[in-house]
Image: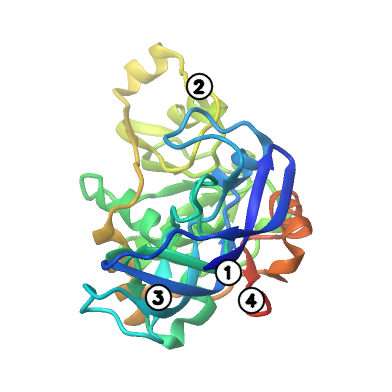
């Protein structure tokens, strides 16, 4: 069994390759992928070669952890999945000697059945956003219950955190954005340039920018005893001046990777209409155009989320 996959052969060098897949076991399902998303966080770092040491790191690799497709086959030990079922898959390791980091950008995947999360057909291509929705949910749920009142960055993750905060009954957070192409698209909350915001009493600041140099600025905007949540992914070491943080008695929390429960909760919120995903997918390309789609996803500020359509790849 084979698949066509995006392969990062080395930094800045990407190709579509036909790869042999590992044989599925009794607890596995085979998923024919319909859509996959391109991450502008971790995948950008993999593409540029600036990814810090990470488990499984090395080239060549298959990236991607945002895949949606239909189950094409099930193992003899699988009882809770059905052929034809639409599922979300957070990546795979089924490419033999080629690393799967994170292994979702391929036309076909072999994964453990419990890694294939059933989703309603009505979710369609928006299902690729579940990883970021789960990340947003985990960032908020991992705290002490204080909702964000400042979010730094108006990309997909920043927008999802804002939508979740409002859906949970909190006051609309302020969002900082310096890129003009990303200011629009807010749903019930203000988006401002940091220089236009004079407030310095934020209780909970969620940074999704990935900018390791912002910490001193953010500490200066905290209320005493306030918290900064690092919800992005940072390639550079993070440091800060101690005296201002000491004066504020600032707290720092790192939001780790989402857990399976976050993914299920995010799916259910979307299905119930409590977390809208509209307006977040802005660019679409056939998977055969992957070599040009990735640079666009990483370099065009108007691109919030790029998806690849695998339906023509057999």
Whichever of callouts 2 and 4 sits on the residue coming sooner in the sequence is 2
User: What crowding class fits label 3: few (fewer than 14 Cα within 10 Å), some (14-19), or many (20 or more)?
Assistant: many
Res 231 quadrant in image: top left
Image location of residue 283, percent across then percent down: 69, 68
Q: Give yes or no for contact between labels 3 and 1 (Cβ–Cβ under 8 Å).
A: no
Whichever of callouts 3 and 1 sits on the residue coming sooner in the sequence is 3
Circle 2 residue = 237
Circle 1 residue = 107
Res. 314 mark: 4
Q: Give yes or no for contact between labels 4 and 3 (Cβ–Cβ under 8 Å).
A: no
Task: Estimate the spatial distance between the alpha carbons at disc 1 and disc 4, rounded to whole Å.
Answer: 7 Å
Task: Estimate the spatial distance between the alpha carbons at disc 3 and disc 1, rounded to whole Å.
Answer: 14 Å
Res. 87 mark: 3
Image location of residue 314, percent across then percent down: 64, 76
Whichever of callouts 4 and 3 sits on the residue coming sooner in the sequence is 3
Whichever of callouts 3 and 2 sits on the residue coming sooner in the sequence is 3
* Residue that appears at 72% across and 48% down: 14
Q: Which is more foreground, mark 2 or mark 4?
A: 4
Res. 126 mark: none
Q: Secondary structure at mark 1?
A: loop
Q: Which is more foreground, mark 1 or mark 4?
A: 4
Residue 100 versus residue 24 in the image, above or below: above
* Coloring basis for residues: rainbow
Whichever of callouts 1 and 4 sits on the residue coming sooner in the sequence is 1
Q: Secondary structure at mark 4?
A: loop
* Residue that appears at 51% across and 33% down: 234
């Amino acid at each position: 069994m084979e698949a066509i996959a995006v392969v990062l052969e080395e930094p800045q060098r990407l190709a579509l390759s036909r790869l042999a897949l590992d044989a599925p076991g009794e607890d596995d399902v085979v998923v024919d992928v319909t859509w996959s998303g391109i991450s502008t966080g971790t995948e950008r770092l993999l593409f540029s070669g600036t990814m810090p040491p990470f488990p499984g790191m090395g080239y060549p690799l298959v990236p991607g952890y945002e895949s949606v497709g239909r189950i094409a086959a099930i193992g003899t030990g699988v009882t809770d999945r059905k052929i034809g079922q639409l599922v979300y898959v957070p990546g795979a390791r089924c490419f033999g000697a080629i690393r799967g980091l994170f292994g979702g950008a391929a036309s076909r995947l072999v994964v453990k059945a419990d890694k294939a999360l059933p989703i309603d057909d009505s979710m369609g291509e928006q299902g690729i956003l579940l990883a970021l929705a789960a990340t947003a949910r985990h960032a908020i749920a991992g705290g002490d219950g204080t909702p964000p009142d400042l979010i730094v960055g108006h990309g997909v993750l920043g927008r999802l955190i804002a939508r979740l905060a409002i859906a949970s009954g909190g006051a609309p957070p302020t969002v900082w954005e310096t890129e003009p192409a990303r200011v629009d698209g807010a749903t019930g909350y203000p988006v401002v340039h940091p220089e236009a915001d004079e407030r310095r009493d934020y209780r909970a600041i969620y940074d999704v920018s990935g900018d390791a140099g912002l910490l001193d600025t953010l500490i200066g905007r905290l209320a005493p005893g306030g918290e900064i949540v690092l919800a992005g992914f940072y390639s550079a070491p993070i440091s800060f001046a101690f005296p201002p943080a000491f004066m504020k008695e600032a707290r720092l929390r790192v939001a780790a990777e989402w857990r399976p429960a976050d993914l299920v909760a995010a799916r259910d919120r979307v299905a119930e209409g409590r977390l809208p995903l509209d307006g977040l997918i802005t660019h679409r390309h056939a998977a055969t155009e992957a070599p040009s789609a990735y640079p666009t996803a990483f370099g065009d500020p108007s691109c919030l989320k790029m998806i690849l359509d695998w339906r023509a790849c057999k």
